[in-house]
């Protein structure tokens, strides 16, 4: 399904003023990514937004506190522009809580239909999107195309990509992680679905990707993310077929190609556990190891 909305952007350089000081236990910042696209950091969570002549396009608010801080900072830099669109990446509240802070008269809240359904069913404390789509949606942002796409199960419900073709820019949350291992046991992942989604998204023509966690990177970094998941899957499957226990695989499997990734030592055994549990559950192989 395709829908078309109207919006525009323009470039404004800025610097973080002294008034932006926040509590030491909270790290917040705004980074100019070029092409009128900005990245917001709230500790280990990230979202992006686009500044236009008539308003703003926002993505995940992250939380009420984070969104309140961000909105104040945007007003200081760009004036009191209305928020025209809020795009939720998926249904997880650690990314989409606080939507009420971004609500203005006429704001469109947009999400995949599965994400919106889950938020509504669980009575999530955020704005429930009323503009939804099933496969793809396009926003005409005053002549600038913004493409949203769903690839199937990967992480959470209704997790999508936001692609800005003229900037060759991609925003994805949770199922793209660059230069870092996936989070612990990967319980929120659909392991095979994430691999399939990564293969699909790599067909887009992008140069820069800003994930919802981890560093900003390139298309080659996304290929490396995919390679890690495939190598992890293959190593765990090999161990299962050899009859090794989970504990043996956690001790013995090493993926040295990725040793420089953040959290490699701490999380590799947990990633192995998560991969094993998903693979064993799907194939009905629990308790069959020696």
Image (spheres, grey):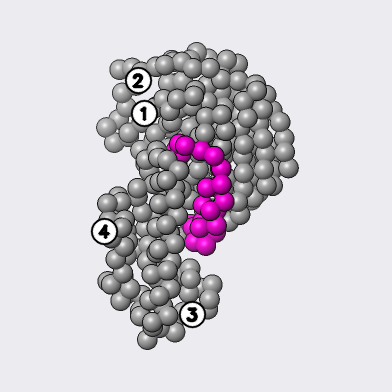
Query: What residue is drawn where x is 54% and y is 72%?
Result: 282
- Label 4 environment density (alpha carbons within 10 Å; few <14, some 14–19, many ≥20): few
First in sequence: mark 1 vs mark 4:
1
Whole-Å distance between the Cαs marked 1 and 4?
Answer: 28 Å
Whole-Å distance between the Cαs marked 1 and 2?
Answer: 8 Å
Please name the residue that numbered disc 1 is placed on: 29
Say whether marks 1 and 2 touch (CB < 8 Å). Answer: yes
Q: Quadrant of the N terminus?
A: top right
- Residue interval drawn in magenta: 188-211
The answer to whether residue 260 is left or right of residue 162 is left
First in sequence: mark 2 vs mark 4:
2
First in sequence: mark 3 vs mark 2:
2
Query: What residue is drawn where x is 39% and y is 35%?
Result: 42
For this rendering, which residue is in front, 116 or 124? 116
Please name the residue that numbered disc 4 is placed on: 265
Find numbered disc 1 in the image and state the secondary structure of the residue it sits on.
Answer: strand
Q: Residue 133: x and y, percent?
A: 69, 43
- Label 1 environment density (alpha carbons within 10 Å; few <14, some 14–19, many ≥20): some
Q: Residue 48: x and y, percent?
A: 48, 32
Please name the residue that numbered disc 2 is placed on: 16
Please name the residue that numbered disc 3 is placed on: 285
Whole-Å distance between the Cαs marked 2 and 4?
Answer: 35 Å
Query: What residue is drawn where x is 52% and y is 21%?
Result: 51
């Amino acid at each position: 399904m395709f829908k078309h909305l109207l919006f525009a952007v323009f470039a404004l350089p800025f610097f973080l003023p002294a008034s932006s000081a926040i509590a030491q236990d909270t790290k917040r910042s705004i980074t100019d990514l070029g092409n009128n696209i900005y990245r917001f950091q709230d500790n280990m969570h990230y979202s992006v937004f686009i500044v236009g002549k008539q308003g703003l396009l926002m993505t995940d608010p992250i939380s009420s506190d984070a969104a309140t801080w961000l909105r104040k900072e945007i007003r200081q830099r760009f004036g009191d522009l209305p928020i025209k669109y809020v795009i939720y990446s998926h249904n997880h509240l650690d990314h989409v809580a606080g939507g009420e802070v971004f609500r203005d008269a006429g704001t469109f809240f947009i999400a995949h239909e599965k994400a919106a359904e889950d938020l509504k069913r669980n009575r999530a404390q955020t704005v429930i999107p009323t503009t939804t789509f099933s496969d793809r949606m396009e926003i005409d942002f005053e002549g600038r195309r913004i493409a949203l796409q769903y690839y199937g199960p990967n992480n959470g419900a209704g997790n999508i990509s936001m692609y800005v073709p003229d900037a060759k820019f991609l925003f994805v949350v949770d199922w793209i992680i660059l230069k870092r291992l996936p989070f612990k046991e990967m319980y929120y992942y659909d392991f095979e679905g994430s691999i399939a989604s990564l293969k699909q998204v790599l067909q887009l023509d992008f140069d820069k990707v800003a994930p919802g966690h981890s560093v900003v990177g390139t298309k080659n970094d996304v290929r490396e993310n995919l390679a890690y998941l495939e190598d992890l899957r293959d190593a765990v499957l090999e161990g299962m077929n050899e009859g090794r226990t989970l504990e043996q695989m956690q001790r013995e499997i090493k993926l040295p190609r990725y040793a420089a990734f953040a959290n490699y030592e701490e999380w590799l055994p947990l990633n192995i556990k998560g991969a094993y549990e998903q693979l064993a559950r799907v194939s009905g192989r629990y308790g069959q190891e020696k």
